[in-house]
Structures are given as C-alpha cells and as structure tokens.
Amino acid sequence: MKITGFELRRVSMPLVAPFRTSFGVATERDVLLVRAASADAEGWGECVAMSEPLYSPEYVEGAADVMRRSLIPRLLAVADLDPRQVGRVLEPIKGHRMAKAALETAVLDAWLRERGESFGAFLGAVRDRVPAGVSVGIMDTIPQLLDAVDGYLQQGYLRIKLKIEPGWDVAPVRAVRERFGDDVLLQVDANAAYTLADAPTLARLDDFDLLLIEQPLGEDDLRQHAELATLVRTPICLDESIESAKDAADAIAMRATRVVNIKPGRVGGYLEARRIHDVCQANGIPVWCGGMLETGLGRAANVALAALPGFSLPGDTSASDRYYAEDITEPFVLESGHVRVPDGAGIGVEPLPDVLRARTAASEWLSS
C-alpha cells in the first residue's frame, strides 16, 4: 500500500485517580496518537512513551520529534509499503521502539481495514475475550490500599498486581493476603526499584504465594536477575529487560526469568511482540500482556495480542474506566472478569470524533 501521509495528534487524558509507581506519580497522560492514511483506508497507532523518560529513555516529545525527522520520511519514501516490513524500513534508526511501534501499528491497522481482517485474526488470536487483571499503584496507607483492592475485586478483576518499592513491599502484600485470602491471584511489580542486596527482603515475599515478582532489578542486568532467581522461590518476571525476541531468548537461556511481560510499545511493535510470544511458548515460558495506561486505541490492540495461545496469565487489560472517566473510543468494559477482543477490521475500534476533538492539544499532518 502507498501511505499518503501521517497525522501526529497530542491528546490530554486525565486519570480518574493518581497512579503511583516506584519512579513517579501520574495524574494524566500526554498521549501521542498516529494516524496513517492511504488512498483507501486509514489506521491508528498509540505511542506509549511517557511525558518524561522515567520508565524508559523514550518520552512523548522525543517520540514525536524522531517520527517527524527520521521515521516518517522513510515510510513515505516507500512506493509500496508492506506493513510487515515497517520494522526493516525503520531499522537504520537506532532505538526509539515506542515511536516505531506506534507507526507500525497505524500502518497495520490501515492495511487490515483495507483487507477487512481483524487485528486478532492477523496476529493469531485463539480467544474472543481475555481475562483482565488490574494494576494497583503505591498508596499512602495500607487501609487505602485495601479499600482499592476490595473495589477492584468487587468489580470482578481476576488478578491483582501491586506496585512495590523499598519500604512498601512486605507489609502491603501481607495485608492484602490476610484481608482477601490465598485464592486471589496476586503479583507484584517493582519497576527495577531494588538491587541484589535487597534479596533477603524480596525472599520474604515467598510466604505469600505470589504469581511472580516483576522486574525487581535494573533493566540492563540479566546476570543479577539470574542470581536473584536462585535466592527466591517466587518466579521472576522480566519487563523492562525484554526489548526483543533475542532478549527473551537470552534471558531464558540464562534462567533470569520464568515469566515474561510483553508490552508491544516497549519491544517495537506487535510483530516483535508476537515473535517474543513464540520464543517463550517454544521454551515453556508463560507470558502476559502489560499495560501503559493506554486509551481504547492501544487497549484494543493489546487485547487482541493477549488472545494469542501463549498468554496464559491475566494481563493489565483492564476496562477503560480503570484509568479514564471518558475514553476516546467506545469504552472497554469488564464482563465476568474478562474484556472482549474486537472483531472488526483492523484494531476494531475508532476514536469518537467529539471526544477526540475535545481532548486534542495539537495535531500536525506530514506527507511527502
């Protein structure tokens, strides 16, 4: 297909409540949306970069700049662009996986809409709905945390993930287990907040029958994760450390991980995410789909990915109202603890024009 142009649109999305992790507090998302247009269709992608480079080196303004200067001109220069080759076209530009992922998704969405094929069918989805988990941020007090967890369980979420950091780990996990019992699927996420010296503290979490400890150590240290895995019984899950199928294969070979969180934006797109899924499935490593507070556009694609056969654990595929009072698409809703996989062409959802217009802070059109 020939892409005639790309729109970069900045959208401001206030969160229903502050979301605190070990690296900061978010009260809204500065979202960069990408719209790819051809003569016959258009498609959408969502860049998951944050406003500041806290989770990864990428950030929204930088993603927009590299798209504008380096990535989009390369795609517009291709006369007949196969969306499965977007990664190869953009490969000369080092890094910037979140920016590349958004562009690849937009081109894929346009191509699939033109063909009348759903994102899930293209990726290889085997389910029409996926189990939904919820991520619970760091709270000021344990009673506040317990109230939040109780609310999510009452809504029907099938898995609870607690954000942790040094000083907020064993006590809140113990409190949740004591209040809600051993049947609740429970895991924790450190976002690389610990060092190997904290192994004794992390080992105390073994008493609580957790599904996993997500990214306890630095993202660039597989060796220390492998060592930590010998010191704790709870499975280590890697997130920030896995940026490609090669990274996943290396981590598995080093026994640095027993579970992998696949975030398409972090790894450069849904095609690389599928390759990571395939590597993990071939090695008997369960995977789940992480989230980056996506709007309905990004959530639709994530839910389709989470319907692949190797995604055996509930992901961060929450309903829209977990984060937003008003989504920019028709909202995703929780149905008996699950979220439906869109079955329309492409990602299967579109922005609501009035909401999109009201939330747009800036937009620009780039063409050849």
Image: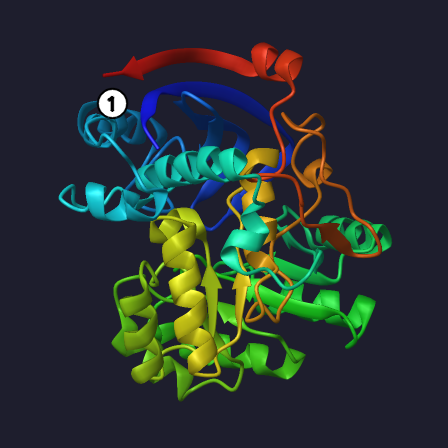
* Left or right position of 149 against 360: right
Position of the C terminus by quadrant: top left
Marks counted in the figure total 1
* Left or right position of 87 against 347: left
**Which residue shows up at 29% across the image and 37% down it?**
81
Q: Looking at the image, can residue 49 be seen?
A: no
Say what secondary structure mark 1 lies in.
helix
**Which residue shows up at 33% across the image and 46% down it?**
56
**Which residue shows up at 71% across the image and 56% down it?**
128
State the image coordinates of residue 294 (x, y, percent, origin top left): 55, 38
* Left or right position of 62 against 8: left
Position of the N terminus by quadrant: top left
**Which residue shows up at 55% across the image and 80% down it?**
204
Q: Looking at the image, can residue 88 be seen?
A: yes
Q: Is residue 230 above or below residue 296?
A: below
Tell which of 368 and 139 is nearer to you.
Answer: 368
Badge 1 amino acid: Arg
Q: Is residue 351 above or below residue 118?
A: above
State the image coordinates of residue 105 (x, y, percent, origin top left): 43, 40
- Identify the image quadrant of residue 311: bottom right
User: Which color scheme does this rendered protein use?
Assistant: rainbow
Residue matched to label 1: 68
State the image coordinates of residue 167 (x, y, percent, origin top left): 51, 60
- Residue at the extreme left: 92
Packing grade of label 1 (10 A; few <14, some 14-19, many >=20) is: some
State the image coordinates of residue 278 (x, y, percent, origin top left): 43, 71
Tell which of 368 and 263 is nearer to you.
Answer: 368
Tell which of 228 and 153 is nearer to you.
Answer: 153
Q: Is residue 81 above or below residue 179?
A: above
Tell which of 308 and 69 is nearer to you.
Answer: 308
* Left or right position of 235 against 136: left
